[in-house]
Image (tube, rainbow, N blue to C red):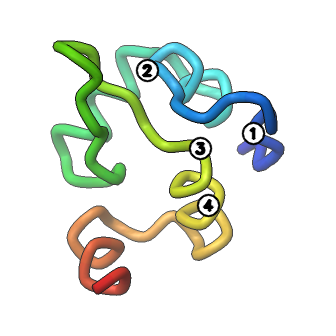
Amino acid sequence: MIQSNIEHDLVLLSAAELARVLGTSTRTVWRLLAAGRLPQPVRVGAQPRWPADELRAWIKAGMPPAERWEESRV
């Protein structure tokens, strides 16, 4: 079950935090990203991070594939 209640004090989520939100493993987060099923992360230094507000909107939109999500945001 997907936890759509991303903690409001988090601005950027790590892969581990995103995994917890999605109710999956960190390894699955990387697989979903490689398969184009997750929005692209931003880089903070060398670390990938997902903006919490974008993830909330993506989940609310039904978690579309990354390509469709990016097209809908333009």
Q: From the viewer's side, name the closer residue of 70 and 35.
A: 70
Disc on res. 53: none
Q: Nearer the viewer, mark 3 or mark 4?
A: 3
Disc on res. 15: 2
* Residue lying at 27% horizontally and 15% vertically, measured from the top left: 47
Q: Are marks 4 and 1 in contact (CB under 8 Å)?
A: yes
Mark 1 lies on residue: 6
* Within-10-Å neighbours for mark 4: few <14, some 14–19, many 20+: some
Q: Nearer the viewer, mark 4 or mark 1?
A: 1
Which of the two discs, 3 and 4, labels the residue nearer the N terminus?
A: 3
Between the residue at mark 2 and the residue at mark 1, the CA separation in whole angstroms equals 13 Å
* Residue lying at 59% horizontally and 43% vertically, measured from the top left: 52
**Residue type pointed to by label 2:** Ala
Which of the two discs, 1 and 3, labels the residue nearer the N terminus?
A: 1
Q: From the viewer's side, name the closer residue of 16 and 52.
A: 52
* Within-10-Å neighbours for mark 1: few <14, some 14–19, many 20+: some
* Residue lying at 67% horizontally and 69% vertically, measured from the top left: 60
Q: Position of residue 7 (x, y in %)?
A: 79, 33
* Residue lying at 26% horizontally and 47% vertically, measured from the top left: 40
Say what secondary structure mark 4 lies in: helix
Q: Are marks 1 and 3 in contact (CB under 8 Å)?
A: yes
Q: Are marks 2 and 3 in contact (CB under 8 Å)?
A: no
Say what secondary structure mark 2 lies in: helix
Disc on res. 52: 3
Q: Is residue 4 above or below residue 59?
A: above
Say what secondary structure mark 3 lies in: helix
